[in-house]
Image: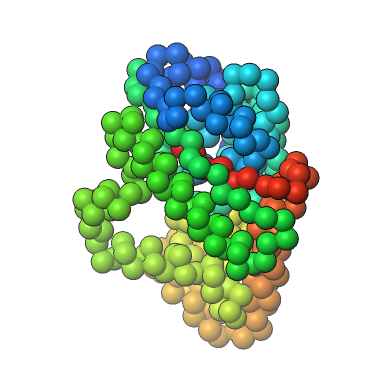
Amino acid sequence: MAKRLLSSPPVVALGSTLAAGYILLVYATSKVRCEPADTDAKLFAQRPQIFAMWHGQFLMLPKIKPDRPAEVAAMVARHGDAEHIGAVLKCFGMTLIRGEGAGALRRNRGGAAALPFSTLGIVVGNPIWVPAGTDEAALEASRLAVERGLNEVTGRAYALAGATDPLSDVTHINAEKPSRSLTAYRALTRLAAPLAPLGAAVLTGPHWRNFADAYDELLRAGGCRQVGDAASLAEAALSLLADAQARAAMMARAEGAIARMSGALPRTIAELDRFLPPKVTLQHAS
């Protein structure tokens, strides 16, 4: 009930208006440091292009959007908090391309946590050219180049703001080492969903928000079962071990769910391809 209420059009409209007002307040009261100083000139010199940033940094988009007239389309997932994010971006004159969620690969780099009266860093990186008709190996090399570029400009943006990237190697080194039980739990959670297409019945606890796309689909399809504590885990495991037919049915439903979620990259490229000429530029920024 609460989820339906929060995703209802009136609540989304009100929330997006308040969020847009907050974003304007952040920019109006904060010092913005850009690199290069004229980001508009760099962006317009290389348009049209695909502009990439890490998950969680959508708050930066209104400022990155050129002040001069420009058509900007933002790719937003089809579910979860994406409806609210999309509504906020529409408040700033952006159109939406509905794409796939980041799922287990989501990397939140903290841009959405910007506060009023702070310093914001915006860095536009160098373009990565991807020729039309690129094969899978070259496409993967380009993806890795984009990831490296995103890491570099994100670190530079945090430096301009006088902060440290929360997912940088330095942050990881200085972070408190998690307990063995927490490390094991995280490892098992990461492994659970990918095991589904390998012929394994999946039992999961309730804490899978970072992998919401995969688990939402698996749970809806009946391809995995959520348990709340050790007792229910043992009961569910023993039940599945004793019932080969139920176990096989769960695995079949999981395989179907995984098949429906596969192919996100080709679908994303197909959506973007409609907006671009044959020569494509990938631009990364933070």
Name the side, left or right, on which 116 lies relative to 258. Answer: left
- Where's residue 86, x and y in %? 64, 33
Q: Please identify the quarter of the rendering in which residue 50 is found.
A: top right
- Where's residue 53, x and y in %? 51, 42
User: Is residue 249 in view?
Assistant: yes
Front residue of 63 and 81: 63
Residue 59, placed above or below residue 184: above
Q: Quadrant of the N terminus?
A: top right
Residue at (65%, 51%) from the top-left corner? 100
Residue at (62%, 36%) from the top-left corner? 46
User: Is residue 82 in view?
Assistant: no
- Where's residue 286, x and y in %? 46, 37
- Where's residue 167, x and y in %? 35, 48
Name the side, left or right, on which 226 lies relative to 280. Answer: left
Q: Residue furthest right?
A: 274
Residue at (45%, 29%) from the top-left corner? 36
Q: Residue furthest front?
A: 45
Name the side, left or right, on which 237 lies relative to 110. Answer: right
